């Protein structure tokens, strides 16, 4: 072997470094494909099993009941030799029509019929409210830290606190929100308590990201503005924040997914297992803030752990997860579109 | 509160009005600066014995110099000698950097100490415009760039803004090149045009003084020539202080030249004298290119 003269001078010599190169390449590549495979499995299962309860083969091809109705119990029974499945309301009507049906033994599964409309509404409300609060507080804090505050012990301490806050588990935020908003402030289990709890949870992400975006705005824009006789706030409002906004939005997209998906912070503060009324069915406008809502992640938790697993309940379990993914994707795409539009407006 | 010293506001002369464009003047060579024809000099900015510190490191040592009204004053000197530092002292841009201070000495503009407590730095900066080394048009339209300063002052009248935009762009010799695309981004202009846009933006608020920190250092010779021409046109209406590394530029554009070395003012005299007959051997060595 060694005696073979190389065919040309650029042939790869069989050194250890070349062999290692090949191994490392395979290892890193393998790790990447492993991640993709896991992702594909998760999404594939949810989409594969969940799409069935959202889409249908008959027109209009979307199962509107699932998207627009409230959850109901599912009744499964045999009547006149045929197996029947129906939601609670339908079952009552059926029994009223066929009194004999009342005597047939029926199995029932809670939440497995109807739809998940109240959960969708609740989740959207929670996301909008908490992101509004988190962005307002977070961007203000970032502006203060980055533009106004002079570096000192206190500021370093604040930064450390923010960093630590980012590491706090979400269940702790849930307990904090419960103690603070639900009990101490007396807001009870309410949208407002959920908003603040979720907002505090994503605040560190928003602050850190906003600061990064502010830092990325060139000094020259600030100096140019100040040299024209602008105050600091005028400079920030007209010549810094608009350019930082796309970056801030990019990072809040991550926040949206977290806010929409976390179960622990809302299960003591905002989420009801079941609620008949929709959020806008309130008597006074203020009641809107002080009502609990159903929320998708909590609903998923309930239907996947509190009711039996079988072919009848699977539909709502996977269907909810599928819709949840879809909602996060929609909200995130909307933010990405908005960001791109802002980015095209201000380029440097 | 009542002091004998006039405030900046009271002593402000009528806003400079743009006269029609003068016919192209004969190129004033270094030997014949315009100052030869000018009446007796009047001091606008009086810098006395200034020591300036960045934290613990001293950047200016005992600098005294009087900048004259409606003259072009050039600051020259090797890199790091403190030209920009002094320039940024004049509109207190150094306030923005933590830990900086004028430890000793005073800077008076029309007799008012700009560090005295009742001087509002915002008002000061409206009167003293600045053009930066790295041109910094805002990522907005040309129109918005020019009107930025006026909008800050609450001017919203569209007709007035239009008028100022045209006047400033003409003043910065940029009107003909951009008049058809005022709504295009200022960043879409060439480097030289961007710098002239920045000058137009500065003159739109009608300052008394324009500070220019190496305005041509990033420009090619043609763009540089345009900016220099512009300085020639602005000199009759504004007091201009220009930092430059380009000896010819200082010689061509300025009436007075200050040579700095290691944070000290070495020589300050008529430009003609600095370049033909410097009093100090260091100045001579620098302007003749033997060190620096
Ligand atoms: N922000 C700063 N912090 C600390 N020191 C600084 C700062 N800016 C400038 N200096 C120092 O002050 C001195 C003078 O700097 P300055 O920028 O005024 O020089 P310059 O004459 O403008 O140089 P150049 O021709 O390279 O622009 C230098 O020694 C520089 O290192
Ligand atoms: Mg400089």
Image (cartoon, coloured by chain):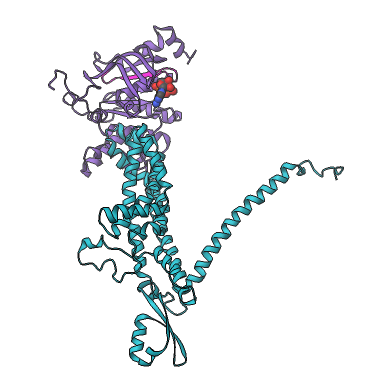
Left or right of A5, for residue A182? left
Which quadrant, please, contains the C terminus of chain A?
top left
Residue A140 in the image: x percent, y percent? 31, 44
> Seen from this angle, which residue lies furthest left?
B2
x, y (%) of residue B257? 36, 16
Look at 55% across and 63% down and name the residue there.
A41
**Residue B246 falls left or right of residue A186:** right
* Side of A160 where A186 appears, left or right: left
Q: Residue at x 47, y 92 (%)?
A: A81
**In the rendered view, would you say B37 is above or below B144?**
above
The residue that appears at 39% across and 19% down in the rendered structure is: B56
Q: Quadrant of ligand 1?
A: top left
Q: Reply yes or no: does residue A299 show up in magenta.
A: no
From this view, report whether residue B133 is shown above or below residue B141.
above
Our reading of the magenta stretch's main secondary structure is: loop
Residue A300: % across, % down = 42, 66
Compared to A327, does B42 lie above or below? Answer: above
Frontmost residue, A144 versus A313: A313
Residue at horizontal 28%, vertical 66%? A279
Q: Which residues are magenta?
A: B68-82
Query: Which chain is assigned cyan?
Result: A
Color of chain B here?
purple
Front residue of A141/B246: it is: A141
Q: Quadrant of the N terminus of chain A?
A: top right
User: Picture quarter containing residue A110?
Assistant: bottom left
Viewer-closest of B45 and B92: B92
Q: Position of residue A98 (x, y in %)?
A: 36, 92
Residue B76 falls within the magenta-colored stretch: yes
């Amino acid at each position: 072997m060694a005696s073979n003269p190389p065919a040309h001078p650029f042939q790869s010599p069989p050194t250890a470094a070349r062999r290692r190169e090949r191994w490392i390449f395979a290892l890193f590549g393998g790790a990447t494909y492993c991640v993709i495979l896991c992702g594909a499995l998760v999404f594939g299962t949810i989409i594969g099993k969940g799409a069935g309860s959202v889409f249908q083969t008959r027109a209009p091809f979307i199962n509107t009941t699932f998207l627009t109705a409230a959850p109901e119990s599912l009744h499964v029974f045999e009547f006149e030799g045929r197996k029947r499945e129906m939601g609670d309301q339908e079952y009552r009507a059926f029994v009223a029509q066929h009194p004999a049906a009342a005597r047939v033994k029926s199995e029932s599964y809670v939440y497995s019929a109807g739809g998940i409309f109240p959960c969708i509404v609740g989740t959207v409300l929670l996301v909008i409210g908490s992101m509004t609060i988190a962005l307002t507080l977070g961007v203000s804090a970032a502006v203060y830290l980055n533009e106004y505050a002079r570096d000192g012990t206190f500021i370093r301490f604040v930064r450390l606190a923010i960093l630590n806050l980012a590491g706090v588990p979400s269940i702790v935020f849930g307990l904090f929100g419960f103690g603070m908003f639900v009990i101490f402030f007396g807001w009870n289990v309410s949208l407002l308590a959920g908003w603040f709890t979720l907002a505090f949870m994503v605040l560190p992400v928003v602050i850190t990201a906003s600061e990064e975006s502010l830092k990325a705005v060139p000094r020259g824009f600030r100096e140019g503005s100040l040299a024209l006789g602008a105050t600091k706030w005028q400079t920030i409002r007209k010549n810094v924040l608009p350019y930082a906004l796309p970056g801030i939005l990019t990072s809040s997209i991550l926040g949206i997914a977290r806010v929409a998906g976390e179960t622990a912070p809302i299960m003591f503060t905002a989420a009801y297992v079941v609620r008949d009324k929709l959020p806008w069915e309130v008597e006074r406008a203020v009641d809107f803030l002080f009502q609990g809502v159903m929320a998708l992640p909590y609903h998923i938790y309930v239907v996947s752990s509190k009711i039996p697993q079988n072919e009848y309940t699977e539909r709502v379990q996977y269907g909810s997860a599928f819709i949840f993914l879809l909602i996060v994707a929609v909200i995130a795409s909307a933010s990405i579109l908005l960001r791109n539009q802002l980015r095209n407006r201000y380029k440097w | 509160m009542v002091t004998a010293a006039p405030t900046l506001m009271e002593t402000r002369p009528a806003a400079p009005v743009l006269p029609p464009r003068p016919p192209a003047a004969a190129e004033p060579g270094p030997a014949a600066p315009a100052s030869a024809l000018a009446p007796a000099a009047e001091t606008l900015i009086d810098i006395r014995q200034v020591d300036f510190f960045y934290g613990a490191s001293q950047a200016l040592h005992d600098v005294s110099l009087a900048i004259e009204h409606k003259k072009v004053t050039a600051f020259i000197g090797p890199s790091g000698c403190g030209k920009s530092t002094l320039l940024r002292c004049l509109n207190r841009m150094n306030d923005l950097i933590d830990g900086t201070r004028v430890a000793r000495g005073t800077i008076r503009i029309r007799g008012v100490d700009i560090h005295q407590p009742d001087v509002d730095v915002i008002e000061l900066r409206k009167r003293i415009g600045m053009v930066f080394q790295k041109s910094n048009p805002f990522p907005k339209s040309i129109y918005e760039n020019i009107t930025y300063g006026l909008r800050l002052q609450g001017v919203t009248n569209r007709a007035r803004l239009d008028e100022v935009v045209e006047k400033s762009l003409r003043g910065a010799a940029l009107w003909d090149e951009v008049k058809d695309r005022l709504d295009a981004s200022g960043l879409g202009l060439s480097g030289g045009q961007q710098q002239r846009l920045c000058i137009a933006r500065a003159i739109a608020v009608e300052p008394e003084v324009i500070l220019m920190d190496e305005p041509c250092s990033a420009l090619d010779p043609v763009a540089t020539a345009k900016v220099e021409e512009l300085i020639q046109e602005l000199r009759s209406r504004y007091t201009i202080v220009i930092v430059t590394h380009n000896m010819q530029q200082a010689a061509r554009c300025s009436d007075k030249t200050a040579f700095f070395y290691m944070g000290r003012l070495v020589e300050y005299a008529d430009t003609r004298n600095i370049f033909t007959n410097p009093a100090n051997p260091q100045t001579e060595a620098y302007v003749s290119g033997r060190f620096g």
